[in-house]
Image (spheres, grey):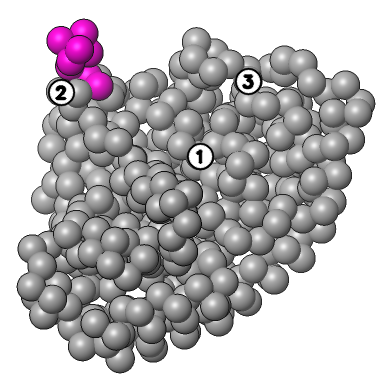
Amino acid sequence: MSEYLSDRVQKVKPSATLAVTAKANELKSQGIQIVPMGSGEPDFDTPENIQQAGIDAIKNGQTRYTAVDGTPELKKAIQEKFKRENGLDYSNTEVMVSSGGKQVFYNLCQAVLGKGDEVIIPSPYWVSYPDMVILADAKPVIVETGLEQNFKITPKQLENSINTNTKLFVMNSPSNPTGAVYTKNELQALANVLKKHPHVLIITDDIYEHIRWGNDDFINIIMADSSIKDRAIILNGVSKGYAMTGWRIGYSAGPEAIIKAMKKIQGQSTSNPCSIAQAAALEALNGDQSIIGTMVNAFEERHEYIVNSLNAIDGVECPRSQGAFYSFPRVDGLIKRLGLKDDVEFSTYCLEKLNIALVPGSAFGAPGYVRFSFATSMDNIKQAVERLGSV
């Protein structure tokens, strides 16, 4: 039946992270106990006040269509969030709500990219960036970073990657899959490069904004240099910081013309995000924020354990993360020791022989690495490390 499929869909790959989760669930259904280290979602319940807001929305009849770009109340809360937490002012027409952060990026690609356009994506990258670019008939330009440079693109690399076809530069800090966080000085240096190339748009994916440790406050590239604000788009949402992955609420802010174009795309695809989830997201942004600190403390403790434990295994080199809930160790030494071909075969070995669900680094543009998600219990983490250390 492949002759009926479009060239577009045949160019893209299924999500590797979702594929790992599906395979792990299939094995679980057969009675096999899998240690889940692949899923990128907090293992905490959505806070009760947020749950109750969703329940109240149902009981109060908030079950109908909303405006395509979100309810006025939620949009106002998003504006206030940006001003309160990021020192950034956006008008009502410069923000919109979508069905998750993934839709934000998809909307943007469809709104601004076309044939011949290029998008600079530092690797390791979130798995869906390149394929969404391809779905918009544009070309992803992958810039390799690595453990030696803390998984961060340098100003020189950025400068060397920009040409007349470059349309968009993608940033993600804290990063999925590495947990790397850019400093203010690093962001300013990248902004200085971008200011020389006014035809390049910027998107900063801040979905892990609240999940970080250390003494530094969160900062993105627009906060570091406000002069690029008129061609930069922020992607954010409630999924990670409020344990609301299944509620599917993301939001964006940026130049009015681009947000308007993204709204048009959304209006002809999904229309408005779920009205009930929007009511819950309103409570998330305006209500009790203590869930964030509770989760971050747990993630930091797990991070310390997993980094120290993985580095004790022969053939594994695990750098420290600064945020998100992932460790991204280099495992090529272990792969060689086990006589395996690559990180994909290694991940299959871990799933089928050790019953550990991991995502291969190749899915993130980084062969020889694997992603451990520590958004799971300490018991699961200890089991995974013990099983891996036994080989």
Q: How many marks?
A: 3
Magenta residues, start to end: 1-9
Answer with mark 3 or mark 2, whichever residue precedes in sequence: 2
Question: In front here: 327 or 179?
Answer: 327
Instruction: Select label 3 or label 2 by which is in front.
Output: 3
Identify residue for label 1.
Answer: 101
Where on the picture, by quarter, is residue 97?
top right
Q: CA distance from mark 3 to mark 1?
A: 14 Å
Q: Label 2 is placed on what type of residue? A: Gly
Estimate the x, y position of residue 63 in percent, counting from the top left.
79, 21
Kind of residue at badge 3: Asn
Instruction: Look at the picture and state if 191 lies above or below 382.
Output: above
From where the camera sits, is residue 182 visible? Answer: no
Q: Position of residue 311 (x, y in %)?
A: 30, 87
6 part of magenta stretch:
yes
Q: Nearer the viewer, residue 21 or 108?
A: 21
Q: Earlier in the sequence, mark 3 or mark 1?
A: 1
Q: Earlier in the sequence, mark 1 or mark 2?
A: 1
Please identify, in this view, whether the residue under mark 1 or under mark 2 is nearer the observer: 1
Between 347 and 103, the one nearer to me in the picture: 347
Tell me: residue 305, above or below residue 206.
below
Q: Report whether 247 appears left or right of 275.
A: left
Most distant residue in the front direction = 31
Determine whether, in the image, residue 135 is placed left or right of residue 110: left
Q: Is residue 286 left or right of residue 56?
A: left
Is 7 inside the magenta-drawn segment?
yes
**Secondary structure of residue under mark 3:** loop
Q: Residues within 10 Å of mark 1 (few under 14, many from 20)?
A: many
Q: Which mark is residue 116?
A: 2
